[in-house]
Amino acid sequence: MSIRAAQRPYRIVPVLIGLLTLLLSARPGIADGQEPPPAEEKAPARTAPQTAPAASPAAEPVDPSKQGTLTLKLDGNRQFCVVQNELEFSDAARQKPRQQRNSPLITTMGYKYQISVSRRGTSGVTKLFESPTIRTTYYEKPKPTETTPQPRLPTEKDKKEAGRPFGAAKKIPRWIPDSACTTLKPEYSFPLLEGRYDVYLGFDLLTPNGHWVPLQSDFIVDLTIEKGKEAKVQGKVDYSAGERVVTLGVPAKKASSGSR
């Protein structure tokens, strides 16, 4: 009995080794005699390369110590007004087409104004201020006629409108009286680099074909801007007596003025 009791621990050891081997062989993905694959390593997250913002080629650093000030002061009632037929037509053109005889002739679609400068020794014009477009006309569809059309010979107007799609009636321009006048501010001020400038104040007209044409303007030439100083320009925009006035001027010996 004592010999058998002493041999029992030696019989248990092979059993335990067999169970351990069975468990290792049952693990998925591991074959006999093979090493388990190493744990998958995650690649570090890639970040987009940081680049410095590119400088705008049109932007030019300006030293405030080299700047002066241009101040434009306006006299008069500062109102600028337009009429509905700023563009003139010949008498023959006013007689056709026929719809122009049934309604007022409108050639002013809108207008705007700007203050610009041109620095001597450089090319191009710099707009210091430009107003939004002031619309003076809108288009309205003609009212349908209730009368029954009667058979007749085609007129010249019918021949011109023959290529128009069916139902596409020509819209009629209508004038907006409240937009005929605009009021400018009493003073405009702009920082400028030192130098000599030509200064321009102009009003442009929007035509029926969508183009802009000069309407009325004035300018001065050879205005000196000195650093740390203010150069004053005196202007006048007035419509008191029903006549438009647009002028620019400066003190003597500082600049020359002109109009166009």
Image (cartoon, rainbow, N blue to C red):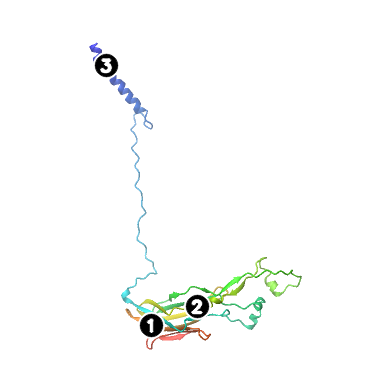
Q: How far apart are the alpha carbons under marks 3 and 1?
A: 118 Å
Q: Nearer the viewer, mark 1 or mark 2?
A: 2
Q: How far apart are the alpha carbons under marks 2 and 3?
A: 116 Å
Q: Of the residues shown, which amino acid type is indicated by label 3?
A: Arg
Q: Of the residues shown, which amino acid type is indicated by label 1?
A: Lys
Q: Which mark is residue 232?
A: 1
Mark 3 is surrounded, within 10 Å at the Cα level, by few (under 14), some (14 to 19) or many (20 or more) other residues, namely: few
Report x, y in % for residue 257. Answer: 43, 86
Q: Which mark is residue 63?
A: none
Q: Describe residue 75's horizontal placement relative to residue 150 as left or right.
A: left
Is label 2 in a helix, a strand or a loop?
Answer: strand
Mark 1 is surrounded, within 10 Å at the Cα level, by few (under 14), some (14 to 19) or many (20 or more) other residues, namely: some
Residue under label 2: 182
As drawn, 43 above or below 100: above
Tell me the residue at 48%/82% (across/down).
217
Mark 2 is surrounded, within 10 Å at the Cα level, by few (under 14), some (14 to 19) or many (20 or more) other residues, namely: some
As drawn, 10 above or below 168: above
Is label 1 in a helix, a strand or a loop?
Answer: strand
Q: Residue furthest right?
A: 151
> Image quarter for residue 230?
bottom left
Q: Of the residues shown, which amino acid type is indicated by label 2?
A: Thr
Foreground of the two, 70 or 119: 70
